[in-house]
Structures are given as C-alpha cells and as structure tokens.
Image: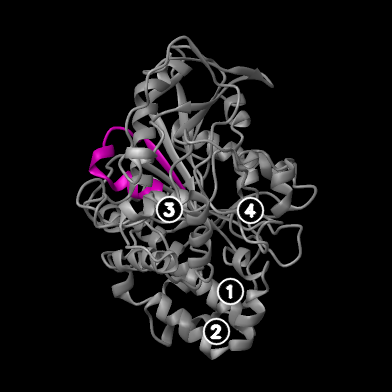
Amino acid sequence: MTPHGAVRGRYERGVAVFRGIPYAAPPFGPLRFRPPAPPEPWDGVRDAGAFGPTAPKPPYSETFTPYLSDPVIPGDDCLNLNVWTPEPGPGARLPVLVWLHGGALTRGSSAVPVYDGTAFARDGVVCVSVNYRLGVEGYGLFPDAPPNPGLRDQFAALRWVHETIGAFGGDPDRITLCGQSAGAISAGVLLAAPATRGLIRRAVLQSGAPEVCDRDKVRRMVRRMATRLKIPATAEAFAAVDRDLLLRTQAEAGRLSSPVLGGPAFGIVMDGDLVPRDPLKALAGAGAAPGVELLMGWTRDEYRLWFVPGRLGERVDRLGSVALAGAMARCRTGHEVPRGYRTLRPGTGTAEIVGQMVTDHLLRVPLHRVADARPGASYLYEFAWPSRLPGLGACHALELGFVFDTGDAPESKRLVGEDAPRELCDAMHGAWVRFVAGGDPGWPAWDATHPVRVFGDGVPYTAYGPRDAEIGLWPTAHSDPEPPRTAVPRPPAPNSPPPCAACAAR
C-alpha cells in the first residue's frame, strides 16, 4: 500500500521491483510550472510492472548519443519513482538508497538501464530511483511562477519515501540520498535545505558539488528561448507552446553551453523558501545537516566526456591562450593558477590544463571545503580506472556501472567498453552498500591527512592528499571559510603504487 492506493510489482532475479509509482500529479494543465501536487488516489491495485513516463526532454546530440543512453517513455504522469527491495512488506527495516539521476538538469531519467537497482536489493538495500521535471519545465525562471519546480519534485519524492518506504521493507530513519552530476548537485542542495532536516541520514555526491546558479544565467536561457519562439518570457506564454517545439527550442538555445566552458543554462537558484541560502556555504560553514555522513568524489578525467566525443579538446589545444583565458574567466581566477598547473603537469596540453582547472573549480575545491568542515563524517574517493574506449580515460559518468554493478549492461558498455573488471565492480559497489548500511565505506574518514580512496587498475588503495598540490593553488578567498591548513606527515598508503621521483620531491 502507498498513501494513494495499492501497487503490484514483479519478482525479478530474486528481488521485488515496483516501477512507475506516482509520487505527485502530472505536472501539466493548471499544474504546469507549479510546485508538485499529490496524485489522485486510485481504486483497486495499480500495476507497477513497467517504468512510468519520463519527463519531457530533448535527445542528446549526435555527438553524445553513442556514449549515453536516455530512453523516452511517453505520457504526462512523469513524476514517478521505482523501488527495488529484497523484502517487500512492513517490518524489515532495511537501509534505503534514493537515487537522483544526472543529465545537466535537462536530460536523463530513472529508466536508464545503468541505474537498475537489482544489485543493491540483492545486497540488502532498498533502492529507489526518481523522475523529476527537467529543463525549462523544471528549472526555468519566470516572473509568474515559483522557481525550482524540478527540485521541489525531488523534495516531494523524498518525503514520499520517508512516509511510505516502510511498506516496502525500508527504514525511513536510514535514508541515503545519492546522486551523480546534476543529481549530486541536487542532493547537496536538498541536504543543506532546512526543510529536509530529519529526512536524510546519509548522502552520496558523485561528480557534483552543492551549488546554486546565478539567476541572470537562467533568465538568459529563458530569454533565448523566448526570442526564438517570439513570445514573452513568462510561464503563461511558455505553457501555450507546443511541447515538441519547446523541446527543440530548448536544445537549440543550449547548444553551445557546456559544463566545462559554461554559458547560459538551467540550474537551481536560491528561492527564499526551499533554498533560502547558498548550500555550499551552509554545508561548509553554517552547520547545515548536522550528523549526516557524506561520501563524495569525482572521476580522474571528468572533462573528457565533453572534450573527446566532439573533438572539442583538439580545438581547445589549437586555441591555446585564448581557451586558457576563457577558463580563467569561468573559474574567476588569475594567471597564477594556470601557471601552477603548468608547473605541476609539465608538457601537458592546454585542453588537459583547462579541463582539470575547471574540474577542480567545480568539484574538487568545493568538495574539499565540505569535507574539511565535516571531518570524521566525510569519506572521499577518486575513480581512476580508464575506459576501454580510446581517449575517454576515467571520464564523467564512467563510474556509474561500477556503483550499480551494471557494467555488463549494453548501456554501460557505451562508456566502459568490453570486459569491465569484475573485481572493480565488486569493490566499488560493495563500498557504496557498506556506506548506505552503516556509514563506513571501508577506508579512513576525512581528517588532516586527507585520505582519498582510489578506484583504478588493481586493488583500490587509500592515497593521502593526492589533489592537495592543485587545490593549494587556488586563492584563499576561493576556499573561504576553510581555516588555513597545517602541513602534517602522511602515513604510508597500503597497496598504493610508489610515487614518482617528481612527486616524492614535492
């Protein structure tokens, strides 16, 4: 039973699966661009054997289609979720993982096969994956509609899980909110929100740090669309546009935007309500979410997912100093930072310098800030195993098939290639299960020695301060309110490869 009616799932590979359960009403008609409303109750038993409709979204461009899967399921009832559980029915009190997918807040869904929750349920975790509004429907900023409806969808789903997951064998007091990329940004924002106090026991932020977007940046994206459509930049005017035309226009307006290079984009904004303050400042300095344990990390070569498929990296290398100037503007820093990266990475091309700078600015620096503010309750990792596909390295989203233990799925192989190492799947998925179940993934918690678990070729090992040299290049103001760091001796890392001579000299 759910609060709105009974659902019937399926037993598949030894676990019970319920798909397409509505947690909110279809966000169309009078509910378009509005906060989520409760779904209409239903009589009888609702079949939950198939994924529900996905939120409206444009397809990935031809550049990314070979690498990323993004199924489309038509229908208006897109505010739905899925549950994988080993023990359906009340009384089991199992730990719960709630998954928020990535996709730059414009693409993605819970129906992506890489996110199949079977392995988590097999290992004693109730896994819930969520659909939420995307793009202009979920993150457009209008004078006649409340901001952040997509984030409010996620909040509504989190409340649904807290109130209902006991019926599926889950423990509402042991919920881990987990996301990757835009899903991790969302999870971090929700974690910092006062309204979620008591709903989240733990959180996992994969390749995304808590942040809010500049309101004018979102408005520029909406105005671009309005100009192309020749309509006012209001929710009322946008609601009258054919849905397919709206998606095509959104794709055209955001064509040149990039997580690395920036540009107008949709994002979460401070709204004085669900997001009353900057979430990074709240988590790193204002004491938000006390007692919540965090697992956070990145892939070694995040930027290669954007640089390699469209050969953008080659263009960046050709542009040289022009591209570097753009990166400095994006990162709001001076010449001293890229000079430092050149010193640390002699002989490295401009594309890698730009990519690593922006990755540190967006991910590693803010995640270090959060960890420094929460020692003993934070665990950091780096995914360093390179894809079997040429040029991708350990790119953005590559770790997902290992976390969900779905590396053999055809959709995972689009990024991973063939023959993902079984032992790496076991190690990474096992670490996530241990964290969700008990708060300890299996390596030391963050302290002054800066332990980071490295998942790469061979046995995972703990490195101490592996990114400190780069992060130390950033101006103090960039990492405020961190206290100054004191150099400490680092213990030897078991199973870690010996440092090169240059590293040892540093």
Q: What is the C-alpha distance between the residues marked 4 and 3?
A: 37 Å
> Height in image: 352 above or below 74?
below
Picture coordinates of residue 454, whole percent (x, y): 59, 54
* Residue 193 inside the magenta-drawn segment: yes
Numbered disc in front, either 4 or 3: 3
Q: Is residue 400 above or below residue 312?
A: above
- What residue does disc 3 label? 241
Mark 1–mark 3 CB contact (< 8 Å): no
Task: Classify mark 4: helix, strand or loop.
Answer: loop
Q: Which region shows up in magenta? A: 185-205
Which numbered disc covers residue 342? 2
Q: Nearer the viewer, mark 2 or mark 1?
A: 2
Quick check: 141 left or right of 45? left
Q: Is residue 8 visible?
A: yes
Location of residue 87 by image quarter: top right
Outermost residue toward the bottom in this view: 321
Tag of residue 398: 4
Residue to which mark 1 is pinned: 503
For the residue marked with disc 2, what is the amino acid? Arg
Image marks 1 and 4: residues in contact by CB distance under 8 Å = no
Residue 469 coordinates in the image, percent (x, y): 48, 73
Label 1 – label 3 distance at C-alpha: 58 Å
Among the two numbered marks 3 and 2 on one chain, the one whose residue lies closer to the N terminus: 3
Marked residue nearer the N-terminal end (1 or 4): 4
Instruction: Give the spatial CA distance, label 2 vs label 1.
Output: 15 Å
Going by the numbered disc 4, the residue's amino acid type is Leu
